[in-house]
Amino acid sequence: MTATLRELASTIRSKNAGVDHVTFDVIFRDRRNFERVRDANVLTRDSVAQLYRIEPARITHFVVYEPGNAIKFTIRRLKPSGSPGESDVFGAQQYPPLFDVQVP
Amino acid sequence: MTSVKILCPTGHLAFTPMEKDSFMRGCELKPDFIIADAGSCDMGPRPLGADQHVSLAEWQRHDLEIMLQQSRRLGVPMIVGSASDTGTDRGVDQFVGMIADIARQHRLKPFKLAAIYSEVPVSELKQRLGSGARIEGLDGRADADLATLERTDRAVAVMNADPVRKALRQGADVVIAGRSSDCAIFAAPLLNAGLSPAIAYYTGKLMECASFCAEPFMGKESILGRVEADAVSIAAMHPGQRCTPASLASHAMYERTNPFREYVAGGYVDMTDCVYAQTDPKTTRASGARFVADPVCKVKIEGAGLVGQRRLAIVGIRDPYTIGLIDKAIQWARGKLEERFGPPGQTYQVFYHLYGRNAVMESLDPKPQLQPHELGIVVEAIHKDAKKAAELCALGARNLFYARLPEVKGTAGTAALMSDEILVGEPGYEWTLNHTLPVADPLELFRFRTFNVDAQACREAA
């Protein structure tokens, strides 16, 4: 049965990593859920690029972080945080599209 | 075996006030040092560029007062980094003034205060660039050239542990440091105690955000770290919180692109092989860090510059027809701006933030709401000249009211002006420098002052 990432992960967050990047953390309390998502290949550089409709090159880092039971990726901002016209100075509200990722 | 205990009450001093109860519980365990960072880049470029603090002065005093009183009562040093949010010279002086004032008020016994300044004049950066220094871009940025420096109003160098080590070796009881790597202010006393750079900086990385490394999620609560040889044991001081392998490991990746590396001037901590073990219900022991030294010491430089004056207007739209054609309406309004001001770019910028559609995520939003029930629009205008910014903003907002759409029924106005006024925004700044500068000596960009403080006065030491 498929589940959503929202159901499986205990934390899904986004935040500035320096002034030019927003980094995303998907953390699992349950090691089995982490392994299920990791092995299903539903969170990859390409799938995330597709979800956010960006060039894969804008994803500067994609890391499966075993010690933290987490998958982590980083998107380069189009403009540095807090520049005129920017709307999320902390980068804190860029994660919700991850909620609905379907995990087999 | 050397054992050093560090108490950290807050991850960003005074951003909101620290919680005193868990801090006092930590003080009962007799820490050797009380350490907190007070800065961040998270609030955007304006605080640095305009040299303002974003934490309220009342809260800064609140946090410094609690820390100083306990530091003096216990007779252990207190270290504060990135003074007053940005670590500019103004920020260091402000905190030094507050420390002197608190000492006077509480009639504290004499102590030694060290101030470390980290602002770097833009003229000096230009000079170094002119003599051939490479100001290397971080995070995919191009190297800085003269034009980058021309756009910069203010810059700070981000210190590693060395300047703080020097201040402590000279006998400082209180260190107020300018812009610092968060982990560096924790590493300094550990390095002075003879511990390795690996465990010193790693301890700093784990502890710098105080209770953020514990669970459940709580801010502004204290944690206590006990460092022995190559391991640190971190305990949550709030009765409802605990440090677990998961909470420490997940904090190691917080706000970083690479969860395995923590960079400072002179090298990085490699956390690839770190291991975490629960030692009691509230405490987790972490070890396994390595330090990889950089053959050239490169100090990070943060810089910000003014883009222009900023004005804002709030407009609401309820007519579904106008909402459906909002892009056309904005396009028309932009056309009217161009007729009067020419194309946007160097002289001016106008932004339409469409709350209810995709203001928060903009181009990253996979599912922008095309037909919300109502739409809230913030019109943001930027121009070097404040009057022109206001005019741009007024025209950009009111032309949504007069939007020319072929079949509009509401011919008395196509938008609701919340109140027909132009709000004065803070000036717009940009991060111009996120770069490194190579140095021969890690201390060379930093300046020191020491003071003898007592209940009567704060006198600069000879």
Image (cartoon, coloured by chain):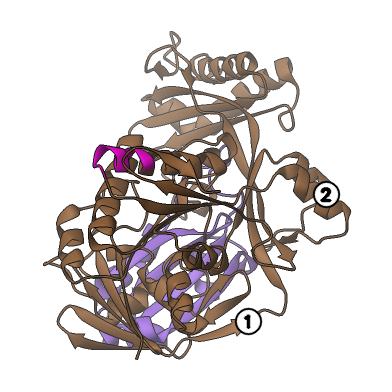
* Residue B220 in picture, x, y percent from top left: 26, 56
Residue at (83% x, 49% y) in the render: B127
Question: At 49% from the left edge and 71% from the top edge, which residue is drawn?
Answer: A73
Can you say which quadrant of the picture contains the N terminus of chain B?
A: bottom left
Query: Mainly helix, strand or loop, the magenta region?
Result: helix
Q: Is residue B356 above or below residue B108?
A: above
- Decide if residue A43 is in sight here: no
| Colour displayed for chain A in the image of the structure | purple
Query: Distance between the Cα atoms at labels 2 and 1?
Result: 28 Å
- The earlier-in-sequence mark between 2 and 1 is 2
Q: Nearer the viewer, residue B352 or B284?
A: B284
Q: Which residue is mark 2?
A: B127
In percent of the image, x 51 and y 28: which residue is there?
B426
Tell me if residue B460 comes above or below residue B365 in the rendering. above
Magenta stretch encompasses residue B370: no
Which span of residues is magenta-colored? B100-107
Identify by letter the chain in brown: B
Outermost left residue: B239
Q: Is residue B208 visible?
A: yes
Nearer-the-camera pick, B374 or A80: A80
* Residue tagged 1: B293
Q: Is residue B150 left or right of residue B26?
A: right
